[in-house]
Image (cartoon, rainbow, N blue to C red):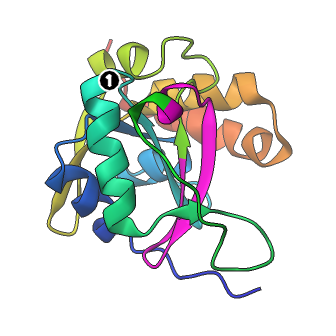
Amino acid sequence: MNRPELNAEDILAALNRHGVEYVVIGAFAAIAQGAPIDATYDIDVTPRRSPQNLTRLSKALSDLGARIRVDVPAEGLEFSHDAKSLGAMEMLNLTCPAGDFDLVFTPSAAPHGYEDLEPASVMIGIGEQTARAASVADVLRSKEEAGRDKDIRSLPLLRRFVREHTSD
C-alpha cells in the first residue's frame, strides 16, 4: 500500500483558505511545540461544529480531493459531504494527495471538541501556514484517556515536557 507522503502545510493551507476554524491535535500538535515524541505520519484536526464552519470544511475537503482512508485502494474511497453530514460525524480518517489526515470532532478528554481545546490552544507555524494547536497539556490528557499502546508509550516524554515547560 503506497500512502502519500504527508504535506501538512498543503492540508492546512486548504483549511485556512476556506476560513475553517480548527485546532490541530495529537502527536503533530505536540511535536510542533517541541515535544520529543515519535514522528507521526498524519495530522489530526478538530474543527468547530458550527454549520457555517462545517460548510467551509466541506469546501476545503473538496479542494483537497479528500477521500475516506482505507487499505485498498490506497487512494481511498470517494464520499459526498456537506455541513449536515459532517455534523453527524465523530471521526473521519481521510487521505488526499497531500497525505493522510483525520477529522476528530470529539477527541478523548475534550467532550465539546473545538470549544474545549481552543481556549488553551497556541499558534504554530507549519511552513507558510499558521494554525491553532492544542496545548501539549491537552494532548497529554487526550493520550492518557485514549489509552492506545502508541499513546501510552509517549506519556512519560509528554509528562516531562509539560512539567519542564509549564510556568508555576
The N terminus is located in which quarter? bottom right
Q: Residues within 10 Å of mark 1 (few under 14, many from 20)?
A: some
- In which quadrant of the rendered view does residue 19 lie? top left
Position of residue 67 relative to residue 144, above or below, is below
Q: Camera-side residue: 1 or 146?
A: 1
Which stretch is magenta? 85-102
Is 1 displayed left or right of 79 in the figure?
A: right
In the image, what residue type sits under mark 1? Pro
Q: Position of residue 157 (x, y in %)?
A: 62, 43
Q: Give me the residue at 75% from left, 79% from top.
A: 73
- In which quadrant of the rendered view does residue 52 lie? top left
Q: Is residue 144 visible?
A: yes
- In which quadrant of the rendered view does residue 40 lie? bottom right
Q: Which residue is mark 1?
A: 51
Q: Give me the residue at 77% from left, 46% from top.
A: 153
Position of residue 67 relative to residue 162, above or below, is below
Q: Is residue 8 visible?
A: no
Is 118 displayed left or right of 134 in the figure?
A: left
Q: Is residue 162 magenta?
A: no
Is 43 displayed left or right of 39 in the figure?
A: left
Q: Position of residue 71 (x, y in %)?
A: 80, 72
Q: Camera-side residue: 38 or 84?
A: 84
Q: Is residue 86 magenta?
A: yes
